Amino acid sequence: MRRGAVMNRIHRYALATAMLSAATLGPALAQEPGSRQTRDFVDAMAHADAFEILEAQTALAQSADPDVRAFATKMLGDHVALDRALADAAAKAGLRPPAKGVGADQAPLLNGLQSLTGAAFDRTYLQHQRQAHQAALTEAQAYAASGDDPDVRALAARAVQTIAAHRAMAEQMSGQTPAP
């Protein structure tokens, strides 16, 4: 019963934050300082962190595999820290705090994961982690190379190292050769 209550709470949070983000994002962009490039990057990273945090919480509630649980614990701690650093960099750039919640493309993945158990859950969680970290790595590398705000660019450069390490861990746990 406890696991069901936790999953229900996580699902409601993910859905509510996705809806709130969508409802408030449009008007906020019209009034906000900073370049579109920086705002888009900050929002993309905030969604990525929210997804990682919610998936890690789901893994801690549902996985029985000690390695998967240890990985989820690391993801949770690191992405909470990245999310805080992102909020600080956004504030230094004069931007509003990043929108909380998963992106519209991430919500179905999270919902699908929550319906799985056992080895199928663990495989799918690690697959999501490989894909999500690859997407986040691409975003962070691009902004670190050519972003127009120095504080946010510095954060992106630091995030590249963390995200690449996470991707390599997920690939290693899945039995894949880590990408360079």
Image: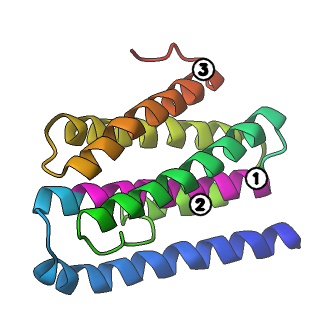
Residue at the (39%, 57%) spot, across then down: 86
Q: Main secondary structure of the magenta part?
A: helix
Residue located beneath label 1 in the image: 60
Q: Secondary structure at mark 1?
A: helix
Specify the label residue 137 is tagged with: none
Circle 1 packing at 10 Å, graded few (<14), some (14-19), many (20+), is some
Judge from the rendering whether residue 117 lies leftward or rightward of residue 149; answer left or right: right
Residue located beneath label 2 in the image: 54
For the question of whether residue 43 can be seen, the reply is no
Q: Secondary structure at mark 3?
A: helix
Nearer-the-camera pick, 170 or 105: 170
The span picked out in magenta is: 41-62
Q: Which sits earlier in the primary sequence, circle 1 or circle 3?
A: 1
* Residue 117 percent across, percent down from the top left: 75, 50
Residue at the (69%, 37%) spot, across then down: 71
The relative height of residue 33 versus residue 68 in the rendered view (above or below) is below
